[in-house]
Amino acid sequence: MSNVAYKTDAAPNIHRKQAPVPEPSKQPLRRGKVTLGEKLLISIAVAIVLIMAFRIISVQAQIYSINEKTQNQETKVSAKEKQTGDLSTEVKSLSRYERVYKLAKKKGLKLNGENVKVVGGQ
């Protein structure tokens, strides 16, 4: 056999395969994934909320303790006012003219109108 090329009238029977057209694939939705920036923003927001909550609670605790101290001081002041009122009532009762005159008589003092001096009280 020889290597001779020959021409034929017949159309060549060439079958070209078409490349399959890729169908547009649907990308799955990426739900539930949080980006780094979102995580950072969320953590900053949570930190701010926690700091503010702690600050509010500490301020309320300070207010409570100051109110408690104020009430204790007011109680002490009212007790002292009551004691002062009681003592002033006792001073008034002890400084009555009749009582002083009676004590002076017991001690042997006599009333001399020329030696009496009136002292202004408070």
Image (cartoon, rainbow, N blue to C red):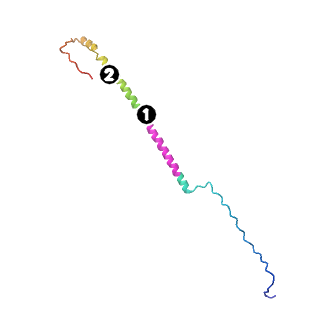
Please give left or right for residue 46 compared with residue 18 in the image.
Answer: left
What's the amino acid at mark 2?
Ser
Please give left or right for residue 7 compared with residue 120 in the image.
Answer: right
Name the residue located 48 percent from the left edge and 44 percent from the top edge: 54
The tag on residue 68 is 1
Please provide percent x and percent y for residue 22. 70, 66
> How much space separates mark 2 and mark 1, taking CA atoms?
30 Å
Q: Secondary structure at mark 1?
A: helix
Please give left or right for residue 121 compared with residue 11 in the image.
Answer: left
Name the residue located 57 percent from the left edge and 56 percent from the top edge: 35
Pointer 1: residues within 10 angstroms few (<14), some, or many (20+)? Answer: few
Reply above or below: 21 against 120. Answer: below
Please provide percent x and percent y for residue 7. 79, 86
Name the residue located 32 percent from the left edge and 21 percent from the top edge: 88
Which quadrant of the structure image shows residue 33?
A: bottom right
The quarter of the rendered structure image containing the C terminus is top left
Which quadrant of the structure image shows residue 38?
A: bottom right
User: Which range is magenta?
Assistant: 43-64
User: Would you name the residue on which mark 2 appears?
Assistant: 88
Please, what is the dominant secondary structure of the magenta stretch? helix
Reply above or below: 19 against 90. Answer: below
Please provide percent x and percent y for residue 36. 55, 56
Pointer 2: residues within 10 angstroms few (<14), some, or many (20+)? Answer: few
